Image (cartoon, grey):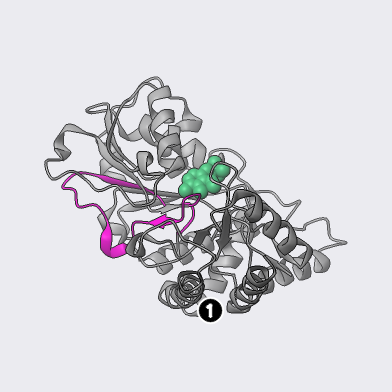
Amino acid sequence: SYNFSAGPGVLPSSVIQQIRKDLEQEENSHYSILEISHRSAKFEQIIAHAEKRLRELMAIPADYAVLFIQGGGSLQFEMLPLNLANQKKKIAVLDSGNFANKAAKAAEAVGKSVEIVGSSKADKYRFLPELPGDFQAEQYDYLHITTNNTIEGSTYHQDNLPQTTGHLVADMSSNILAEPYDVTKFSAIFAGAQKNLGPAGVTVAIIKKDWLAEQKITGVGPMMRYQSYIDKDSMYNTPPVFSIYALSLVLDWVSDQGGVAQMYQNNQKKAEKLYQYLDESDFYQVPVQGADRSLTNVVFTTGDADLDRKISQQADQEGIHNLAGHRSVGGFRASLYNAQPMAAVDTLIAFLERAKQEN
Ligand code: PLP
């Protein structure tokens, strides 16, 4: 069976096997990964390895901190403005989907002023909003974008990032390591692990250190400050030990497969095959326009909500799980994260063709 869930997403089966093996080996020692101290030499090695691997895979320069934080992408929606919007106290957001919208509201909730500088909401997010030609970067602390819109199925790909002379901040929760992005184009990046990096419980934050150093932060406690995590190597308090261990195995897997360039090639092949099938069928439609389409979350519909629901249920019975679109948009969503094999796409296409004939 195949799991097309948008999050948590599929993990490489070799990683699951490794976790099982490690737990079995340690079963009688009471020093399994589920039980060890974050202060143990073993865990210190795991977290250092995870950081090193991520730096290699994304070519993260030394002047960026790589942090492991709990609280998911949603905590970053608050933590980022608290730490990095202290000069103008004003943030620009490109409203490309539900999560950009949520980030904007969260920044406002923690006292920052937010300006939506582009939005495709009125068009149901079928395309990506662009930065207006007269965008004045110097008026804002930063511009927030969501590189991949998990619910709507659209992406600011590496060659189509908004051009700003100011700081660019990216929520890469659903396409980190899916395609190569030039980290130096961003001043901060964050991503919850549970799509492309591992199980839920840890979030990666990549922060340009000299930008953070410029900030005068007041009224923010230590748990919500990036500096606390920098000072203590992400162990200001007890970190999510198991999640970081699993993440380190996923990063090793990506590396063994050939790195992000190889992931990108695989993801392009998977997505192209599925989009091509959907475009050629006269039964399914993809609402998102060509160049803006996501490689990791393929959103489509028959145009009939009841039929979409019926087909998703039928898929589930045939071992094709979690194909229904997000509850806010309906339709279908096939998530093709790094660990999703091409065989899953082939099985899905064969099923969709059968469903088309039968309906
Ligand atoms: N940002 C994006 C792009 C997401 O897809 C998600 C979750 O699906 C989030 C943020 C929220 O992440 P979390 O549930 O880890 O808070």
> Which span is picked out in magenta?
150-175
**Image location (x, y in percent) of residue 73:** 50, 43
Residue shown at 35% from the left, 64% from the top: 290
Q: Nearer the viewer, residue 86 or 135?
A: 135
Quadrant assignment, res 24: bottom right
Quadrant assignment, res 83: top left
Residue shown at 31% from the left, 63% from the top: 158
Q: Nearer the viewer, residue 71 or 356?
A: 356
Predominant SS of the magenta segment = loop
Residue found farthest to the right: 28
User: Which type of secondary structure does the marked residue at label 1 adopt?
Assistant: helix
Q: Is residue 34 above or below residue 179?
A: above
**For the residue marked with disc 1, what is the amino acid?**
Asp
Question: Looking at the image, can residue 293 be seen?
Answer: yes
**Image location (x, y in percent) of residue 292:** 35, 59
Q: Nearer the viewer, residue 293 or 150?
A: 293
Q: Is residue 177 inside the magenta stretch?
A: no
**Image location (x, y in percent) of residue 141:** 24, 35
Residue shown at 40% from the left, 75% from the top: 261
Quarter holding the C terminus? Answer: bottom right
Q: Is residue 162 inside the magenta stretch?
A: yes
Quarter holding the N terminus? Answer: bottom right
**Image location (x, y in percent) of residue 149:** 44, 51
What is the number of callouts on the image?
1
40 lies left or right of 298: right
Which residue is label 1 attached to? 256
